[in-house]
């Protein structure tokens, strides 16, 4: 994965070779109109804070736009279809360097841009999602407590588990370079799916009948599973639909307009199949699968 080192772009350098990585973790003040969130409509991690914005109804106080679908040696780019509406830049890395001229590290999404100070203030998806879910409730149209104080420690614990066993694990499966690694990672992934299926057997959401931030961490991986992870990443020990409670749960979340608004399947397909040339060198986008819910919820492109 390409990186910035001391503000210079190195398309063939891995972040693993860096001794130190910069991050953006500044204060995010709840002020309407001050921030713009850059996401990739394909990225499940950037999907988290975007879901918080749509679920709480913060879309009128924080603007959101996506980078282009295809990520190549130039990193995340903007395009005619997905322009930079705030800074009119060609590449996301330019905003990183503008924010810190000697930035060293990965250029990733999400990136929360402070329009007042003209800098990125946060690029940590989990921290940003939690901040928006807690500190921004006074500006939200919808009165939903995604991070209730009574469940705070449990939600944080489950979110960390989801990140390790689901959100990141699908990538460890897909990017495995040996049969042994693949079989180990895919076993962990599907064991985690079984745990979630059991948990959801008698509840509507991960914490009973109330939507929490944990649901917004799990959904991005589920909605990509059948059409991307099962095919592109070979995460196919079992069809997702055989996890009946988990599948019902995903379909129920899709009945929420705020969730559907963040699902752009064409963009997702373009990104995974055309950007990961090390595992899909031909760049062929498969004809399927196309589960019925894509048509049911109007998500066919």
Image: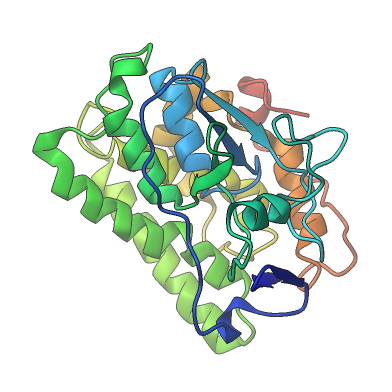
Q: Residue furthest left?
A: 150
In this figure, what is the number of numbered marks? 0
- Residue 126 vs 65, above or below: the answer is below
Q: Residue furthest top?
A: 141
Q: Quadrant of the C terminus?
A: top right
Front position in the image: 140 or 175: 140
Residue 40 rendering spot, x and y as whole percentages? 65, 44
Q: How is the image coloured?
A: rainbow
Q: Quadrant of the N terminus?
A: bottom right
User: Is residue 165 rendered to the left or right of residue 230?
Assistant: left
Residue 115 rendering spot, x and y as whole percentages? 57, 32
- Residue at 48%, 23% in the rendered image: 54
Front position in the image: 164 or 289: 164
User: Is residue 250 rendered to the left or right of residue 4?
Assistant: left
- Residue 114 vs 72, above or below: the answer is above
- Residue at 64%, 73% in the rendered image: 6
- Residue at 68%, 33% in the rendered image: 264
Front position in the image: 47 or 10: 10
- Residue at 54%, 52% in the rendered image: 239
Can you see residue 27? yes
Residue 200 rendering spot, x and y as whole percentages? 28, 41
User: Is residue 31 rendered to the left or right of residue 178?
Assistant: left
Quarter of the image for residue 140 reads top left
Residue 221 rendering spot, x and y as whole percentages? 51, 48
- Residue 111 vs 114, above or below: the answer is below
Can you see residue 230? no
User: Is residue 89 rendered to the left or right of residue 159?
Assistant: right
Front position in the image: 85 or 282: 85
């Amino acid at each position: 994965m390409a990186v910035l080192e001391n503000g210079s772009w190195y398309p063939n350098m891995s972040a693993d070779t860096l001794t130190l990585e910069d991050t953006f973790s500044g204060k995010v003040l709840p002020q309407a109109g001050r921030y713009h969130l850059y996401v990739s409509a394909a990225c499940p991690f950037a999907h988290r804070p975007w879901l918080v914005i749509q679920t709480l109804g913060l879309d009128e106080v924080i603007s959101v736009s996506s980078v282009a679908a295809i990520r190549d040696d130039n990193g995340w780019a903007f395009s005619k279809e997905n322009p930079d509406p705030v800074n009119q830049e060609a590449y996301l890395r330019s905003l990183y360097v503008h924010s810190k001229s000697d930035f060293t590290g990965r250029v990733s999404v999400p990136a929360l841009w402070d329009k007042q100070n003209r800098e990125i203030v946060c690029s940590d998806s989990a921290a940003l999602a939690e901040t928006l879910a807690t500190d921004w409730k006074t500006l939200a149209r919808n009165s939903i407590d995604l991070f209730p104080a009574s469940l705070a420690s449990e939600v944080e614990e489950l979110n960390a588990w989801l990140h390790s066993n689901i959100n990141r694990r699908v990538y460890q499966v897909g990017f495995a370079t040996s049969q042994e690694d693949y079989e180990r990672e895919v076993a962990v992934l599907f064991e985690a799916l079984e745990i979630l299926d059991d948990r959801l057997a008698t509840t509507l959401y991960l914490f009973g009948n109330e939507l929490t931030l944990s649901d917004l961490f799990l959904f991005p991986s589920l909605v990509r599973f059948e059409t991307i992870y099962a095919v592109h990443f070979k995460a196919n020990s079992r069809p997702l639909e055989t996890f009946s409670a988990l599948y019902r749960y995903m379909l129920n979340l899709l009945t929420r307009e705020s969730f559907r608004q963040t699902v752009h399947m064409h963009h997702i397909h373009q990104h995974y199949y055309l950007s990961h040339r090390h595992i899909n060198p031909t760049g062929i986008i498969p004809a399927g699968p196309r589960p019925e819910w894509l048509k049911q919820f109007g998500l066919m492109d």
